[in-house]
Image: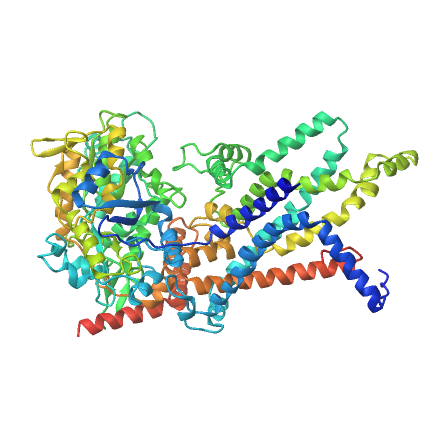
């Protein structure tokens, strides 16, 4: 009987404790004697590195601290970030992927260390002090820098094209919109693969807006924001050029030069139809061409992948390219996890060391002799996935503020071409004058407002709505907060450009 | 229903009553202990968090102390009601759950009536098990299957999904299931029917098991055929269960199933597929606009309470037991 009672009581107690245990939340702080740095970062590789990997351990040894990284799949990172902020349990290093309203409000409220002045000290941080002031300005909030950006090349956008199809048809790489149209038409109608069947089309479009954004800039639309005669900022989609780019895409859609399922075609399957020889053009980042060239070789040995950076509106117009923001997210340092200035300086020191060439080689290529060899000054990295997974995703915590000197061996001509396109694009980049401005309305309702535009644009291209409805959607955007955004951004612009 | 006469007890009788209750509790103390974790669960995870709805009246963002956020009164609500999305959300939510109520709700009842008529036991058991299976298939899988079946070809002349091709050969038209706004309602409904009809029979079959067999025997003697037995004995026997299920269903009338919709949503059908649930997710979880999305969620809860109360009231009024 007694035994029974004890068992029942224990069961009850265990259940109560079990429910209570779910409520705790803690923020670990730094122990400078035996430092462990906690990091929340997004995950993009198939397999991320784990603490038992030799590369991970070599990196820890080099930077002089243990790493405790929580990898979150990139697709749900925004959600995880908001939840982390809400839980009050912070990592020491936190990746911010988009500048949402909670990030901006938290920055202003002093949740994160302001590091702008600290990292300019070249004696303490020889690498971080080399940060690009334009990109620092882009990530600043009210002129204050709260993070270290993950550098990305500015001229990254470009077009991948089946060069062998062009040759078969006697065409050149297009330079103007009209030539581009003719190429797409020929890819559909003139049997570019020479198999006697009408089984190809021009360009693959996906739910990703990148293709369209590039086209709009080539047509002459501003990069996100332009300035009108009165000095007010206007968003790109209110310009005529933007609408002309939409009309152009509509024409491509109606003539079946682009895939008809673009509204549901997922970005992760972008390469599929290109690699199977069904379509010949992708407008996205130029490095996609490098990947396509590598992957298509096994499927079709005759295939050649070309790459180019831009189209001109017509032969005489100026060259315009859409640059990236120069960064892909940035790391902030929550004060709760790093309460003292020494803690912060230690972590910044570690981030500085991660910009040393030796550390960057580890994060990008693994260990020399294990994952890569240096051949003629280039890194030849193994393709064995059992070895590459040892440094999987480690470069996602690298800021790359200092440029990586060791370059991978060019696997093919295309890879070399991609680097040329990067440099070429940079000269013609159209800057976004509003990049650093913070609109309170946008940070609150931005994603919903953006959705109005992207939704209406897709519906116009596939013919679900006409020009009048497109205009009506623009009005809806304005009345739902768009007018406030224009006002807020214009005020900041005018305050600077008096 | 007859009114129960209130009996007045003398103080001594009251004392005896109380003692009796205490002895009962004492006798069943282990059963009460078993109740404890369940009760604690509801207090901790359902009642305590409820004070969080106060966020709906604040300008709150993740990362600050709750009390630091300024009070903003009803401004989150007025923002929502005046938003151009409001009518669209309301309409979509009502259509999606209305269609579920009209087309999906009766199906498990009909199916369990038919199952009940099966006389070969092993066959009945086998069918029952088979129709439960889809319930255990994840919504993600069902949505992927839907995509594969109905996807349109990239370009005319390419092959689309199997179902798309069949419909095309039968009707001569190419039907774009995923992109046409009005089709999404039917897609959601059919997915629901496929997944949940079988599982929904569980509760009705349990009710059917309790029907007195003598009634059937009497009916057979009176010359009632199978259909008549079903309509005059079986169906009335489960009416109260149906009413209870209906009232519960009304409480969830604005719950449209978040996962399913977010998976099937795209730019071309968003006008018809955005509902309160997906909106709260997009605005609250993704954009971090807690106050606003809590206001939307609270509004949804209030509508649900009104729905469940009025369904309960109507049921009682028409002589049914109701829920409370």
Foreground residue among B197 and B56: B56
Q: Is residue A222 visible?
A: yes
Using the image, determine if residue B152 lies above or below residue A328: above
Query: Residue at the front extreme?
Result: A2
Closer to the camera in the image, A222 or B203: B203
User: How are the residues colored?
Assistant: rainbow
Image coords of residue B70 (percent x, y) = 41, 72
Left or right side of A210 for A175? left
Rendered image quadrant of residue B317 = bottom right
Instruction: Give the quarter of the image for residue A388.
Output: top left
The residue at 22%/65% (across/down) is A144
Marks counted in the figure total 0
Judge left or right: residue B296 versus residue B9.
left
Q: Which percent across, then down, holds residue B195?
A: 58, 39
Taking the spot 56% from the left edge, 37% from the top edge, the residue there is B136
Rendered residue at 21%/67% (across/down) = A143
**Of B283 and A349, the residue lying toward us:** A349
The image quadrant of residue A469 is: bottom left
Q: Position of residue B308 (x, y in %)?
A: 66, 59
Q: Quadrant of the N terminus of chain A?
A: top right
At which x and y percent is residue A31? 25, 52
Instruction: Name above or below for residue A362 compared with residue B71.
Output: above
The answer to whether any part of residue B275 appears in the image is: no
Residue ranking furthest to the left: A376
């Amino acid at each position: 009987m007694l035994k029974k009672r004890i068992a029942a009581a224990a069961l009850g107690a265990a259940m109560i404790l079990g429910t209570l245990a779910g409520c705790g939340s803690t923020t670990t702080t730094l122990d400078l004697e035996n430092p462990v740095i906690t990091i929340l970062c997004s995950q993009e590789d198939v397999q991320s590195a784990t603490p038992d990997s030799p590369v991970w351990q070599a990196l820890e040894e080099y930077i002089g601290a243990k790493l405790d990284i929580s990898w979150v799949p990139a697709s749900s990172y925004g959600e995880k970030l908001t939840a982390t902020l809400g839980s009050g349990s912070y990592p020491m290093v936190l990746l911010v992927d988009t500048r949402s309203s909670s990030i901006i409000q938290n920055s202003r409220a002093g949740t994160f260390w302001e590091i702008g002045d600290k990292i300019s000290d070249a004696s303490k941080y020889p690498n971080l002090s080399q940060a690009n002031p334009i990109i620092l300005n882009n990530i600043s909030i009210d002129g204050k820098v709260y993070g270290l950006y993950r550098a990305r090349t500015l001229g990254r956008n470009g077009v991948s094209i089946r060069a062998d199809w062009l040759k078969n048809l006697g065409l050149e790489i297009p330079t103007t919109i009209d030539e581009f149209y003719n190429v797409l038409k020929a890819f559909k109608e003139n049997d570019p693969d020479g198999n006697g069947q009408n089984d190809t089309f021009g360009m693959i479009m996906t739910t990703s807006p990148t293709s369209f954004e590039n086209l709009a800039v080539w047509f002459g639309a501003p990069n996100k924001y332009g300035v009108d005669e009165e000095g007010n900022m206007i968003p790109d989609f209110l310009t005529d050029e933007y609408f002309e780019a939409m009309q152009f895409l509509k024409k491509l859609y109606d003539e079946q030069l682009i895939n008809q399922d673009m509204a549901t075609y997922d970005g992760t399957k972008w390469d599929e139809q290109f690699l199977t020889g069904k379509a010949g053009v992708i407008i996205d980042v130029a490095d996609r061409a490098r990947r396509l060239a590598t992957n298509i070789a096994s499927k079709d040995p005759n295939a050649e992948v070309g790459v180019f950076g831009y189209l001109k509106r017509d032969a005489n117009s100026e060259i315009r390219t859409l640059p990236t923001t120069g960064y892909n997210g940035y790391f902030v340092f929550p004060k709760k996890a790093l309460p003292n200035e020494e803690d912060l300086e230690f972590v910044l020191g570690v981030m500085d060391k991660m910009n040393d060439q030796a550390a960057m080689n580890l994060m990008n290529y693994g260990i020399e002799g294990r994952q890569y060899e240096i051949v003629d000054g280039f890194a030849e990295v193994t393709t064995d996935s059992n070895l590459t997974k040892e440094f999987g995703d480690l470069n996602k915590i690298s800021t790359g503020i200092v440029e990586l000197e060791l370059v991978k061996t060019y696997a093919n001509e295309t890879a070399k071409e991609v680097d040329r396109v990067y440099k070429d694009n940079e000269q013609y980049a159209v800057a976004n004058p509003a990049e650093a401005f913070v609109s309170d309305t946008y940070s609150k309702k931005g994603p919903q407002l953006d959705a109005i535009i992207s939704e209406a644009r897709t519906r116009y291209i596939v013919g679900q709505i006409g020009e009048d409805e497109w205009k009506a959607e623009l009005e809806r955007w304005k009345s739902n907060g768009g007018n406030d955004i224009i006002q807020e951004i214009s005020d900041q612009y005018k305050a600077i450009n008096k | 229903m007859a009114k129960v006469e209130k009996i007045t007890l003398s103080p001594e009788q009251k004392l005896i009553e109380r003692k009796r209750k205490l002895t009962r509790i004492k006798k069943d103390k282990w059963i009460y202990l078993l109740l404890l974790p369940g009760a604690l669960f509801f207090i901790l995870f359902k009642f305590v968090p409820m004070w969080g709805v106060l966020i709906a009246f604040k300008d709150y963002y993740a990362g600050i102390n709750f009390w630091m956020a300024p009070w903003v009164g009803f401004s989150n609500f007025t923002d929502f009601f005046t938003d151009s999305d409001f009518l669209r959300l309301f309409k979509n939510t009502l259509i999606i759950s209305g269609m579920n109520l009209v087309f999906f709700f009766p199906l498990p009842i009909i199916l369990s009536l038919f199952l009940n008529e099966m006389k070969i036991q092993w066959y009945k058991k086998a069918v029952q098990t088979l129709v439960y299976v889809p319930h255990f298939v994840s919504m993600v899988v069902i949505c992927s299957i839907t995509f594969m079946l109905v996807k349109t070809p990239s370009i005319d002349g390419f092959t689309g999904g199997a179902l798309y091709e069949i419909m095309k050969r039968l009707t001569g038209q190419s039907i774009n299931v995923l992109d046409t706004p009005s089709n999404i309602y039917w897609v959601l409904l059919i997915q629901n029917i496929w997944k949940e009809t079988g599982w929904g029979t569980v509760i009705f079959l349990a009710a059917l098991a309790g029907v007195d067999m003598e009634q059937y025997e009497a009916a057979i003697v009176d010359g009632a055929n199978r259909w008549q037995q079903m309509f005059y004995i079986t169906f009335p026997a489960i009416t109260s269960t149906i009413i209870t299920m209906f009232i519960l269903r009304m409480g969830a009338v604005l719950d449209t199933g978040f996962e399913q919709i977010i998976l099937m949503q795209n730019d071309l059908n968003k006008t018809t597929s955005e509902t309160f649930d997906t909106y709260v997710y997009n605005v609250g979880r993704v954009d971090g606009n807690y106050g606003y999305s809590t206001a939307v969620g609270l509004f949804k809860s209030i509508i649900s309470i009104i729905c469940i109360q009025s369904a309960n009231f109507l049921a009682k009024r028409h002589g049914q037991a109701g829920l409370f």
